[in-house]
């Protein structure tokens, strides 16, 4: 299996960094091929703007969705976006490794999705190819997340609400929209308040999940 890890944390020594390295090691030991998109390491541009396009279909008014479609169809995608698209095409499974910021994904990861999951590549607005007919259908996605708050705050009836409901805009409206089969979320909740044994037990759970692929 080909696995792409999209990693969005600025500190290599962080728990997210450790989980990313664990995934690489475990998956390769299982015989899977692994590629990494370290968004901070790449200094990946998080904004979708005019500079994404080698040439423009409409120079008078900038419509990002239409320009993306034209760029994909004519091969005028910027080099950094093209490189990421090639990784996505190669992958059977995409693991998104990131911390929860303000109950969602970090801006740099949102920017990666804005720019890489382009109209004409990940979905087709004109031909209504999305969700069950999304252009990435047949691939799978896994969210591996960490939070600052403990698990209890991410349950139904608590301040943040159930984590699955909270992240629906990512799992369903984004990843599901482009046709990805989204696997159950893996999360380590409130690691800063855990002792070493508790944290190690959570890491072991992730290793076992990875070994199941």
Image (cartoon, helix red, strand yellow):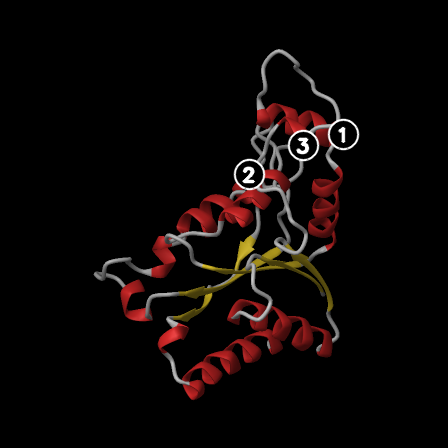
Task: In this rendered view, identify the residue nearer to me: 65 or 200.
Answer: 200
Q: Is residue 194 visible?
A: yes
Callout 1 touching callout 3 (CB < 8 Å): no
Residue 166, compared with residue 173, is above or below; it is below
Residue 208, compared with residue 81, is above or below; it is below
Residue occupying image coordinates x 55% and y 75%: 209
Residue occupying image coordinates x 23% and y 58%: 159
Residue, disc 2: 130
User: Marks 2/3: CA distance?
Assistant: 23 Å
Q: Based on the displayed image, in which of its 4 quarters is residue 114 positioned?
A: top right
Coordinates of residue 83 in the picture (x, y in percent): 75, 46
N-terminal-most mark, 2 or 1:
1
- In front: mark 1 or mark 3? 3
* 15 on left or right of 168: right
Callout 2 touching callout 1 (CB < 8 Å): no
Coordinates of residue 12 in the picture (x, y in percent): 60, 67
Residue, disc 1: 76
- In front: mark 2 or mark 3? 3
- In front: mark 2 or mark 1? 1
N-terminal-most mark, 2 or 3:
3
Residue 58, compared with residue 7, is above or below; it is above
Coordinates of residue 8 in the picture (x, y in percent): 56, 57
Residue, disc 3: 52
Residue occupying image coordinates x 23% and y 62%: 158
Callout 2 touching callout 3 (CB < 8 Å): no
């Amino acid at each position: 299996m080909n696995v792409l890890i999209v990693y969005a944390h600025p500190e290599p020594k962080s728990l997210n960094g450790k989980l990313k390295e664990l995934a690489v090691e475990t998956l390769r030991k299982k015989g899977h091929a692994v590629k990494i998109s370290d968004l901070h390491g790449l200094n990946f541009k998080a904004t979708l703007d005019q500079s994404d396009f080698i040439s423009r279909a409409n120079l008078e008014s900038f419509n990002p969705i239409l320009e993306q479609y034209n760029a994909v169809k004519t091969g005028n995608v910027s080099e950094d976006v093209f490189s990421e698209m090639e990784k996505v095409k190669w992958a059977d499974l995409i693991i998104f490794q990131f911390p929860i910021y303000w109950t969602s994904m970090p801006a740099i990861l949102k920017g990666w999705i804005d720019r890489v999951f382009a109209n004409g590549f990940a979905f087709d607005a004109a031909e209504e190819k999305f969700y069950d007919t999304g252009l990435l259908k047949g691939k799978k996605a896994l969210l591996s997340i960490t939070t600052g708050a403990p698990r209890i705050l991410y349950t139904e009836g608590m301040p943040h609400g159930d984590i699955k409901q909270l992240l629906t805009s990512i799992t369903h409206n984004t990843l599901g929209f482009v046709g990805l089969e989204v696997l159950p979320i893996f999360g380590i909740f409130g690691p800063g308040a855990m002792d070493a044994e508790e944290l190690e037990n959570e890491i072991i759970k992730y290793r076992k999940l990875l070994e199941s692929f």
